[in-house]
Amino acid sequence: MNDLLLAARDVHKTYHLGQRSLEVLRGVDLELRRGDFVALRGASGAGKSTLLHLLGGLDAPSRGDIWLAGRNLAELSAWELARVRRERVGFIFQAYYLLPELDALENVCLPARMARKPARRVEVRGRELLARVGLQDRAEHKPYELSGGEQQRVAIARALINEPELILADEPTGNLDSHTGHEIIELLLTLRQEKQTTLVMATHDAALAARAPRVLELVDGAFVSSGGPPADAPAPPPASPSTP
């Protein structure tokens, strides 16, 4: 199990809206190994975005457990969880979440600056990533000076700045034209191959999903055919104690 990066066991998520409860995920099981590429499909509201948020530690399940790199996310402190997200996970959201007061390069470099990496090395890496997404000439532009597609490419470069083990992409090409979208997917697949990065992508694009070796369909909060472990599979062993 040395190459097991992430395991989710019987994951449920229910949101409480006043006196009403909305059950979004209903017992999801999933295993991801290093270098996997998995596409998540499903109708709007099926739980794709919710599942990505849970897998990356942005939210906590109502029931069930998620292990990332051998550590149960539910057992981590807020500080440890933030460190895991920063160092191991790259998020590509449907919305861009760029800081309006920062230019493109500063937005890309922000996660690495927060990780206190050397400033010069971070800038070089940031410019390299902007070049790889075709924005080398837009590095000093603020988000309001960029098109929607350009902002998404900045967000993708930002997700890659810390060389994450796991990339969680929520409709990463949804705001891009077909040519740029193709280039972005090729970039993500190239980086996955180079770094053995695990890639999980939620998409409505059947052609894009077909690029993935595994396609998982979410219907009514559960996988129709999950490709993950059986419900009674043993949990992965706990990680050895370590100092954050």
Image (cartoon, grey):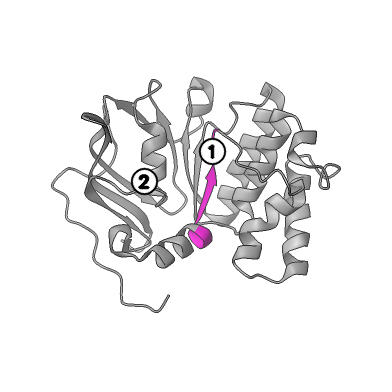
Q: Disc 2 or 1, which lies upstream in sequence?
A: 2
The amino acid pointed to by label 2 is Leu
Camera-side residue: 107 or 29?
Answer: 107
- Which structural element holds mark 2? helix
Which residue of the protein is positioned furthest toward the front in this rendering? 18
Instruction: Name which residue type carries label 1.
Output: Phe
- Residue 22 visible in the displayed image: yes
Q: Is residue 149 left or right of residue 15?
A: right
Which residue is identified by label 2?
54
> Quick one: label 2, few (<14), some, or many (20+) residues within 10 Å?
some
Query: Number of callouts in the render?
Result: 2
- Is 14 or 188 nearer to us in this picture? 14
Res 177 quadrant in image = top right
Q: Residues within 10 Å of mark 1 (few under 14, many from 20)?
A: many
Task: Determine whether the residue tagged by mark 1 lies in a helix, strand or loop.
Answer: loop
Magenta residues span: 86-94
Q: Residue furthest right?
A: 137
Q: Is residue 221 above or below residue 116?
A: above
Rendered residue at 28%/42% (across/down): 228
Residue 90 located within the stretch drawn in magenta: yes
Q: Label 1, on which residue? A: 93
